[in-house]
Each structure stands twice: as C-alpha cells, then as structure tokens.
Image: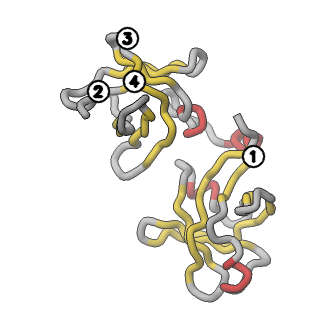
Amino acid sequence: MTDWLDVGKIVNTHGVRGEVRIISQTDFPERRYAPGSSLSIRMKDGSRRPVEVKSHRPHKQFDLLTFKGYDSITEAEILKESMLQIHKDQLGADELDEGEYYYFQITGLEVWTDQKEYIGKIKEIMSPGANDVWVVQREGQKDLLLPYIDDVVKQIDLERNFVIITPMEGLLDL
C-alpha cells in the first residue's frame, strides 16, 4: 500500500477567486476539507504540493475548496486534474465504527461467493447514494457492480484479503 491516500480529485476551477471543484473520495469531507486542514496535491507530473484548506462548501455533487496562497483563477488553474491526498499517518483521528472500513482497505480484496466461486478483485469504490458500490474486475467479463449491503456482503476478512458475498438473483448475470 502506498503511504498516500486519495481523498478527492480536482476537476475544475469555480469562479475567479481560486476556488476549485472537487469530486470527493472520502467518507469524511467535513474533516478532510475543514479550514486549516493540511492536504497534499499530487500534480499530473507526479510531484506533490502541501496545501492548507482556506474554505470549504458543498455545491451540487461537488465540494468547493480554496487553499491558502491560491487566490485567483490563474493560480488555481494549474491544480486541475490533480489528486488531493492525505498521508496515512493522518488517519489516526478517524475513529471507524465496527464494520466500517477505509476505501484503501477494501480496494484490492478478492471477492468470492458463499459457494466458493471466485468472482474477481475490487478495483474501485463508488458512492452514488444510499450505499457504496464496489466495482469488481472480472477476468474476461465486464466489471461487476456490487452493492455494499448486508444482504450481499456477508464477510470481510482484511487479514486474508477476501470478501464473501451471497449474490442476489441476477447479480452475476452477464
């Protein structure tokens, strides 16, 4: 695992005062994007820039942020298409409840049915609404969109790197 975790993607600027539009990839936007928070920006060229959040506000399906030292659209423009990240050492303050996981803990796990049939590996997690959806990469087939709900996901074993599911009718059909 990398020491840096993605918490959002900067997709565009917003207005002329240095605000950027973020597609969030964190379950803790209120904490990650709080004014005064320290984040790192991984630029398109792979370099990293530390930043401090100046302001945050939700807007439609995005989060809008400003950073200290980025006060105009011109200064913010260079941040487009870069990733907001935190170092894994910054996770200590987040207290997860039992049965809750960070995205990075789930991504890469193998998915098996309760009938011992291998499905594939979780390559991405989407948060479209009421529950997360795990994107499972399958060999020679389209990706499976697996709802993260109790009726489907029966066991998560981080130690042994797998998930056991009970597929709903039609879930595994092509």
Q: Position of residue 88 (x, y in %)?
A: 73, 41
Q: In this view, does 143 lie above or below 39?
A: above
Q: Quadrant of residue 13?
A: bottom right
Disc 3 on helix, strand or loop? loop
Q: Residue at x 74, y 78 (%)?
A: 70
Is the C-beta separation of discs 3 and 1 under 8 Å?
Answer: no
Amino acid marked by disc 1: His
Q: Distance between the residues labelled 2 and 4?
A: 17 Å
Q: Distance between the residues labelled 4 and 1?
A: 31 Å
Amino acid type for the residue under numbered disc 2? Asp
Q: Are marks 4 and 3 in contact (CB under 8 Å)?
A: no
Q: Nearer the viewer, residue 136 or 95?
A: 136
Q: Going from the N terminus, do you reach mark 4 or mark 1 first?
A: 1
- The quadrant of the picture occupied by the C terminus is top left
Query: How many marks on residues?
Result: 4
Which residue in the protein does label 2 denote?
151
* Quadrant occupied by the N terminus: top right
Asked whether residue 97 appears in the rendered view, the answer is yes
Residue at the spot of label 1: 87
Give me the C-alpha separation between circle 2 and circle 1. 34 Å
Q: Are marks 2 and 1 in contact (CB under 8 Å)?
A: no
**Vertical placement of residue 173 versus 23, above or below:** above
Q: Is residue 153 above or below residue 75?
A: above
Give the percent coordinates (x, y) of residue 38: 75, 59
For the point 64% across and 62% down, the residue is: 34
Q: Residue at x 64, y 50 (%)?
A: 6
Occupied quadrant, residue 117: top left
